[in-house]
């Protein structure tokens, strides 16, 4: 007897979440970063298909540039190099808002369009990887901060999923993702904003800093929504429902990290800006 889609989704999350939490809290940063890099390259492999590549060799070659960028950055100082990469990543996500207003931008099968989309792998992947490095390496509470940044996206995704399926209502972006609703958006925001209240002491913060952490959570959650919608634009242009099928009940790796790709740079930069 087959599991329903929602039950399979929950079961997979229950199996994978402890592994992710354990890696985030227990692994030192030099060991965590190659693991995260490998996961991001799996997402990049799926992106190459959305960009229009089909043959394995060209798809593998497209991964060389982001791989080299992460390998080079691994030997650079966190400050200022990693911070600069994170700032550039935030600027990229700000510029990419144009796709939410013009979802047909770069649609088509011409070779130059595919090449442009492949070039987006650098600003998509590397700033998120650098942001996680900045968070995780930030003293004794760094691993907790890194986990918090990831967990707020999990909370937002969970809240959005259940609010959207149970309440439904008006569509958030029908031209981009017909399944997403305003109820889902507000449900995700509510779930994410509960997290700072529960975890504030674990992050080494005083209660007087709760408003700043709430603001940071809000900004990162909104960025995560943008990351999700941006991938939806690319999937819609390609005529694909999911980026892959590697994760049962969740689709592909890119489907699971798309929100994080946007949220992590915004969270890391916001943390620095707010002095947290």
Image (cartoon, helix red, strand yellow):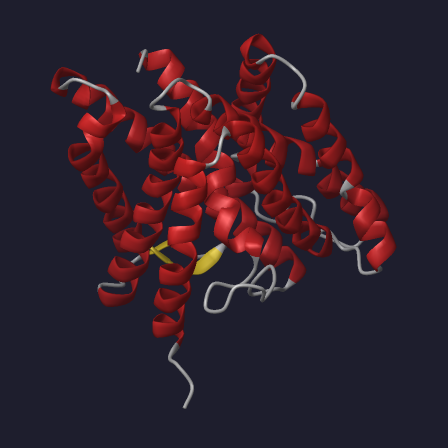
Q: Residue drawn 46% across and 32% down?
A: 264
- Image vertical order of residue 58 relative to residue 263, above or below: below
Query: Which residue extends farthest bottom?
Result: 1
Q: Position of residue 217 (x, y in %)?
A: 30, 31
Q: In the picture, which quadrant includes the N terminus?
A: bottom left
Q: Does residue 20 appear left or right of residue 199 in this picture?
A: right
Visible residue check, residue 103? yes
The percent position of residue 226, horizontal first and vertical second, equals 45, 40
Nearer to the camera, 29 or 159: 29
- Give the residue at the far top of this rendering: 80
Residue in view at x 67 percent, y 22 percent: 73
Quadrant of the rendered image containing residue 252: bottom right
Q: Residue at x 36, y 21 (%)?
A: 140
Relative side of 122 to 26, left or right: right
Q: Residue furthest left?
A: 207
Q: Quarter of the image containing the C terminus? A: top left
Q: Relative to 131, is 256 above or below?
A: below
Write down the quadrant of residue 88 in the picture.
top right
In this rendering, is residue 155 above or below 128?
A: below
123 and 179: which one is in front? Answer: 123
Q: Position of residue 149 (x, y in %)?
A: 37, 34
Q: List x then y, in percent, for residue 56.
A: 83, 58
What number of labels is visible?
0
| Nearer-the-camera pick, 216 or 138 | 138
**Toward the viewer: 83 or 188?**
83
Residue displayed at 26% across by 25% down: 203
> In the rendered image, is residue 110 in sight?
no
């Amino acid at each position: 007897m087959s599991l329903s889609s929602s039950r399979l989704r929950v079961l997979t999350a229950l199996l994978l979440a402890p592994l992710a939490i354990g890696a985030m809290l227990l692994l030192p940063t030099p060991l965590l970063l190659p693991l995260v890099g490998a996961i991001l390259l799996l997402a990049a492999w799926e992106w190459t298909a959305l960009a229009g590549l089909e043959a394995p060799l060209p798809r593998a070659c497209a991964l060389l540039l982001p791989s080299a960028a992460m390998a080079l950055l691994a030997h650079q100082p966190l400050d200022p190099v990693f911070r600069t990469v994170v700032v550039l990543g935030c600027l990229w996500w700000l510029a990419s808002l144009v796709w939410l207003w013009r979802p047909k931008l770069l649609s088509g099968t011409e070779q130059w369009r595919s090449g442009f989309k492949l070039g987006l792998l650098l600003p998509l992947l590397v700033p998120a990887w650098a942001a996680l490095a900045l968070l995780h390496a930030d003293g004794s509470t760094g691993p907790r901060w890194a986990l918090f940044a990831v967990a707020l996206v999990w909370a937002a995704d969970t809240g959005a999923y259940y609010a959207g399926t149970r309440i439904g209502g008006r569509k958030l972006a029908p031209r981009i993702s017909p399944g997403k609703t305003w109820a889902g958006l507000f449900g995700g925001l509510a779930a994410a904003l509960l997290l700072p209240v529960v975890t504030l002491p674990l992050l080494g913060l005083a209660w007087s800093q709760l408003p700043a952490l709430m603001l940071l959570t809000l900004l990162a959650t909104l960025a995560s929504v943008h990351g999700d919608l941006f991938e939806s634009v690319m999937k819609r242009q390609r005529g694909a429902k999911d980026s892959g099928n590697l994760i049962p009940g969740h689709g592909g790796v890119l489907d699971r990290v798309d929100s994080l790709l946007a949220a992590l740079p915004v969270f890391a930069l916001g943390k620095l800006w707010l002095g947290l």
